[in-house]
Image (cartoon, rainbow, N blue to C red):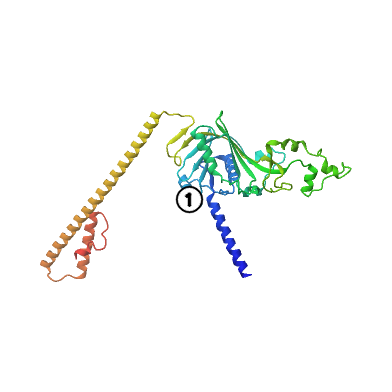
Amino acid sequence: MGKSTRNQKKDRLQANHEAEETYSAVPHTLVFHRGQVGKNVGQLIIDIRKVMEPYTAVSLKVRKKNVLKDFVAIAGPLGVTHFNIFSKTPTSINMRVARLPKGPMLHFQVTKYCLIKDVVSSLKKHRMHEEQFKYHPLLILNNFGQDGMHIKLMATMFQNMFPSINVHKISLNTIKRCVLLSYNSESEEIEFRHYSLKVVPVGVSRGVKKLMQERFPDMNKFEDISELLMKGANLSESEAEQDEEHNVTELPQVYSGRGNMASQQSAVRLTEIGPRMTLRLMKIQEGMGEGNVIYHSMISKTEEEIQEILKRKEAKIKEKEERRKKQEQNIAQKTEKKEEHRKKSLEGIKKKRAEAEEDSEVEDPGAQDGQGADAESDDEAEYYRQAVGEEPEEGDCSSFT
């Protein structure tokens, strides 16, 4: 019994260790806003966090005094790899996607968006439950294989925001949602969609499906139970239209849901659960929004103009470095002058002390009481304050006694 307990503890620790390693190896994203964004954009941020679950901070609180450096500082210890930053101007809604810690940062304009509540309310029957958000969504990129550095960079950025999958090891039961990003080369816009995924067996009537779901169907219209199993007239038109060649596949594994067996034909159905966005790439910038602009959708520069901009930036950096060196030299000179002034003041105090001792020896040789010494010490301290402009340190005046 004791051996079994030890083995259980060992297995539990090993499982926890593997879970921590797996969790730290996947990308994590923080979704937040900068500035005033309003109620609707604030709800959009909450919906995007829902999409990025479970590898995001769902209840992240942002204060007005927080700056971008604050988020960068906590990103490392928390294992955060990406930022998704929303902001709003009088004319547009913007979204920035940044790769930590050194960039790049992609600037998007949100031309259209629709919240989860709006998408769900437009459906006759939605399919969204908390169990779906225990696993990350499957990313699908459409039409990103075109030429262009900015298109490839967008595709790489989006791919790295979501955990990669191993098709040979993944369990199909962990795939409950998918995110579709479709690029339109003519309008240069990206359509963002979020779907719930469901798998159902193909060619089964509604009555049989009810039996699979442990719901007894209404058989008033049937003369014999064989009609429930043999006739396909009870299959609804909507189900018949959805299950076609484009969404029917053979399952390699057993999938959750009655009738979804391995090596059997099943249909994959998608239901949009929102949010949805239409994005337009505006520019790509090196670093965390402070580096060179390597792509701009509205401004194109020749090679000579780019070199001229780089030269101006290098000149500014060089000028800033020279100012810093000159400032350090000025500080060093001031410190040296201050030390020389202090030494001269101490020499003056010492000289005055010596003269005072000579005068006291002439007037009253061999007789100095404690009160006289204290008075002279006070005079020296006052002289030090006037000469140096600082309070005397312990030993500066008493050392001459």
Q: Position of residue 318 (x, y in %)?
A: 32, 39
Tell which of 29 and 335 is nearer to you.
Answer: 29
**Disc 1 designates what residue?**
76
Reply above or below: 350 against 69: below
User: Which image quarter: residue 365?
Assistant: bottom left
Q: Position of residue 201 (x, y in %)?
A: 73, 43
Find numbered disc 1 in the image and state the secondary structure of the residue it sits on: helix
Q: Position of residue 163 (x, y in %)?
A: 56, 46
Tell which of 385 and 322 is nearer to you.
Answer: 322
The residue under the point 70% across, 36% down is 245
Image quadrant where one finds the N terminus = bottom right
Q: Can the viewer see residue 306? A: yes
Tell which of 202 and 162 is nearer to you.
Answer: 202
Identify the residue at the far left of this view: 362
The residue under the point 32% across, 42% down is 321
Q: Can the viewer see residue 87? A: no
Identify the residue at the far front of this view: 263
The residue under the point 26% across, 46% down is 329
Residue type pointed to by label 1? Gly
User: Which image quarter: residue 308?
Assistant: top left
Identify the residue at the far right of this view: 223
Q: Is residue 333 left or right of residue 163?
A: left
Tell which of 103 and 41 is nearer to you.
Answer: 103
Image quadrant where one finds the C terminus = bottom left
Q: Position of residue 94 (x, y in %)?
A: 53, 37
Q: How many marks?
A: 1
Reply above or below: 55 against 185: below
The residue under the point 24% across, 56% down is 385
